[in-house]
Structures are given as C-alpha cells and as structure tokens.
Image (cartoon, helix red, strand yellow):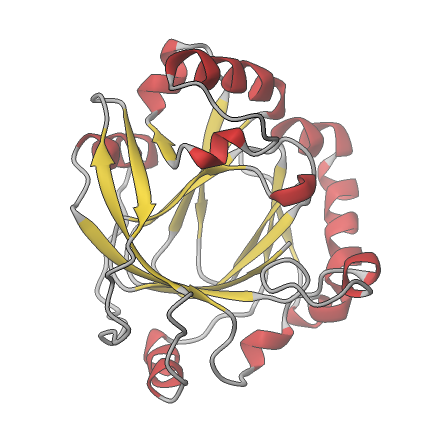
Amino acid sequence: SPLRYKCKSSELGQEMVSTIMKARKQLGPDVVDKRGYLVLETEARWPISELSQLLRASTSPEDTDIRGFTFERGASDFMHAYIDGEAPRIFADLRDTFSTPTDPISGFQQWVENPPDRVAYLVCPPLKEHAINNLLDAGIRSSSRPPLPGFNELYWYVSFEANTPAPLHVEDGGAGSANLLVGGADKHWLVIHRSSASKLEKCVRKEFRQPKPCSQFVRHYNLILSPSWLEERGISYEIVTHRAGEMLVTLPGLTYHQVCNTGCNFAVAIN
C-alpha cells in the first residue's frame, strides 16, 4: 500500500522538513528508504477556478521557461518527451472536468503506446504572489545556499491538459524532492524501487545509444518507460496516485521516477 502520513497545512512551510522526518519514522525508515518515497496527506488544496484566476492575473512566462512537450514514440514500450521550444506563451484556463483512469498501470501503458503529438505544460518560477508559494521549504542547509530556482526556490508546474510528462530522472546532486499538488487532476508517479536503480541504469546503457559520461545520463535520454518494459527486465517499481492536497516526497539518492498528469492541475515543487 502507498506510504501515506496525515498532517496539517501548519506542518508545512518551515516545518516541512521536520514533518517529513516524522512521517519517515512513523511509516518505517527501512520501508520508506527501500521504496524511495512517501506521501503527506495535507489540507492544502485550492479550487481549480481560483488557480485559473491566479494564472490570469500572473505575469507572462519567460522565453526560457518550459511551456510544453512533444513526444516521439520509440518501440511500443517506451517513448521520448522533448521540451517544445515552439509552445505558445498564452494558455487557456484550467478546466475542472477530468477523469482519472481506474487502473494507473494500464493508463500508463496506454499513454506510452499512444502518446499525443504535443501537450501544454508550464514549468516556471512563481509568476505572482500567492499562499501556495509559502508551503514548501528546502531546509536550513539548502536555503543557506545562493538562490537556485527549482532547488531551494520553488517552481510552479501547471498542466493544461491530460498526458503532460516528467521524463525518467533522479534529482540533481542526488537531492530529494517535494511536490505538492494544490489543485486539479491526479498525478501518476511511476517510482523505481531503489533496489532496482542499478539494474535500470544498466539496461538503459545497454539498450540505448552510448551515453556521455554523466551522473544524469538517464535524464538526457528524455525517456518515459512503460510498465511492460520494466517488468520484462525485472525492474521493481510502483505507480502512486498523487491527489490534490497531497505532497509526494522522493528521498535523496537514486530514486528514479517519471510522472503522468491525468488532466489539468497545478503543483508547486522544490528539491
């Protein structure tokens, strides 16, 4: 079963790191460390209509901000997701009509087998002041470093439709991450169990073009792997349904993960 811990919104912000430590202790450090993640069930959620209003009142994203992805299908059991440099800077409102697949595994598989051509997905620093910007904290050590958006300063992640991605990766520098879904449709996280991280890296090295020497070589492939691809190679994983008002935390180290947004949603995240 998913590793879930109930907490209040008051236990986020500057209390977030200590709350994560409490959750890990209560859920069982060995279990959490093996599976590489935990979920905080919070009260921090907003109506999608209010989040749409926030976007309408925000400044325009910069040209350097991610605004969408294109997909390139590989074999039937994997695909590549590339940043769409031609995505528009003007977005439609977030819609609150969405339905989550009843079976996340088959939903993930179908997504990989039949990807759309392109999707609209905004990834950027906050574009306007709002309470959602105060819910995450990078911790004393990271916060004492020079500001680095996405690392010790949070990012917005706004999905304007279903099937927006986060390709397979671990965080830079082996950091952990915290992603709070503040409203909208579910996210499906496919998390590789840390006991299978080395096997995953070995398979990727063997089956794709020779990587350049880099600790982030898997990220550079922009891969999204299907459940069947992983199962055929004996790689242990699980798919976690991440709902509005929940924070999914990945632990530091080799916690490989990839994400599919099942519809319009709005999240804030930090490493």
- Residue 246 vertical placement versus 43 (above, below): above
Q: Residue at x 71, y 39 (%)?
A: 27
Residue 232 spot, x, y in % from top left: 36, 10
The spot of residue 168 in percent (x, y) is 45, 36
Tell me which corner region of the image, top left, top right, bottom left or bottom right, holds residue 251. Answer: top right
Q: In which quadrant of the rendered image does the C terminus lie? A: bottom right
Location of residue 169 with respect to 90 vertically, above or below: above
- Asked if 74 appears above or below 121 in the picture, the reply is above
Picture coordinates of residue 57, whole percent (x, y): 38, 89
Q: Nearer the viewer, residue 161 or 128?
A: 128
Residue 74 in the image: state x and y as whole percent.
Answer: 23, 26
Asked if 35 appears above or below 5 in the picture, the reply is above
Furthest residue toward front: 212
User: Toward the viewer: 76 or 98?
Assistant: 76
Give the residue furthest to the bottom.
Answer: 57
Tell me if 84 is positioned left or right of 22 in this view: left
Numbered circles on residues, count:
0
Residue at (48, 23) in percent of width and height: 211
**Quadrant assignment, res 116:** top left
Residue at 22%, 74% in the rendered image: 92
Name the foreground residue: 153 vs 227.
153
